[in-house]
């Protein structure tokens, strides 16, 4: 649904930009005085500035609050912390499941090379991902909405058997 809307909106914007280019191309040989055009544009500038301030600042504040990072949202007390290690060619998780609705904090690292820690739902849609890097721990915070058997696949080509790097993560019904 959102994908279709995004597609039509993109087409609309592409159409508008193409129309502007075409208009400019068709009128490019007409001579015109520079000063009046510049003065008209300068008169618009303060309005544009205040429109940006009035619209842009609230949009920025609201979208920043929705940023899916721990520092932006804080963690609930019952969050489940799970250590994840990637290695050629398997995943090791300290817990292999959680409850739906529970906040899960994955502390993701690697024992050898870079891997991609990707979590897929039962329809094989990617729901969350982060890098698994040697010598570094990436924190991935995720709340699973629906129960089911989620798949963890490697998102970064890491060697000959990259494609077998798979684990399961079981989400049970919320209490
Ligand atoms: Cu891999």
Image (cartoon, helix red, strand yellow):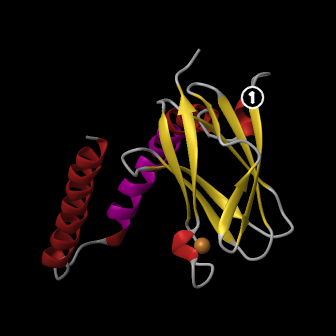
Give the structural element (helix, strand or loop) at label 1. loop
Q: Residue at x 70, y 31 (%)?
A: 73
Q: Is residue 161 left or right of residue 92?
A: left
Q: Residue at x 55, y 67 (%)?
A: 155
Tell me which corner region of the image, top left, top right, bottom left or bottom right, holds residue 138.
bottom right
Q: Position of residue 75 (x, y in %)?
A: 76, 29
In magenta stretch: residue 107: no
Locate the C terminus and report the quarter of the image it occupies: top right
Above or below, comparing residue 141 to residue 124 in the picture:
above
Q: Position of residue 87 (x, y in %)?
A: 72, 70
Above or below, comparing residue 104 to residue 44 in the picture:
above
Q: Residue at x 67, y 60 (%)?
A: 91
- Point out the stretch of residues depicted in magenta: 35-53
Name the quadrant where ligand 1 sits: bottom right
Q: Is residue 158 left or right of residue 10?
A: right
Q: Closer to the camera, 1 or 91?
A: 91
Q: Position of residue 58 (x, y in %)?
A: 56, 31
The residue identified by callout 1 is 79
Q: Closer to the camera, 105 or 55?
A: 105
In magenta stretch: residue 41: yes
């Amino acid at each position: 649904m959102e994908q279709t809307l995004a597609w039509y909106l993109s087409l609309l914007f592409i159409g508008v930009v193409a129309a502007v280019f075409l208009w400019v191309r068709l009128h490019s040989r007409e001579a015109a005085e520079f000063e009046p055009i510049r003065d008209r544009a300068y008169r618009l500038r303060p309005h544009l500035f205040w429109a940006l301030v009035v619209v842009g600042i609230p949009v920025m504040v609201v979208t920043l609050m929705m940023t899916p990072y721990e520092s932006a949202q804080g963690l609930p007390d019952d969050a489940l912390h799970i250590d994840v290690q990637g290695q050629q060619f398997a995943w090791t998780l300290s817990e292999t499941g959680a409850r739906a609705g529970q906040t899960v904090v994955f502390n993701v690292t690697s024992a050898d090379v870079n891997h991609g820690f990707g979590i897929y739902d039962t329809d094989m849609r990617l729901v969350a991902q982060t890098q698994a890097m040697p010598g570094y721990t990436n924190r991935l915070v995720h709340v699973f909405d629906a129960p089911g058997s989620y798949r963890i696949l490697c998102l970064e080509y890491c060697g000959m058997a990259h494609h077998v790097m798979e684990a399961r993560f079981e989400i049970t019904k919320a209490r």
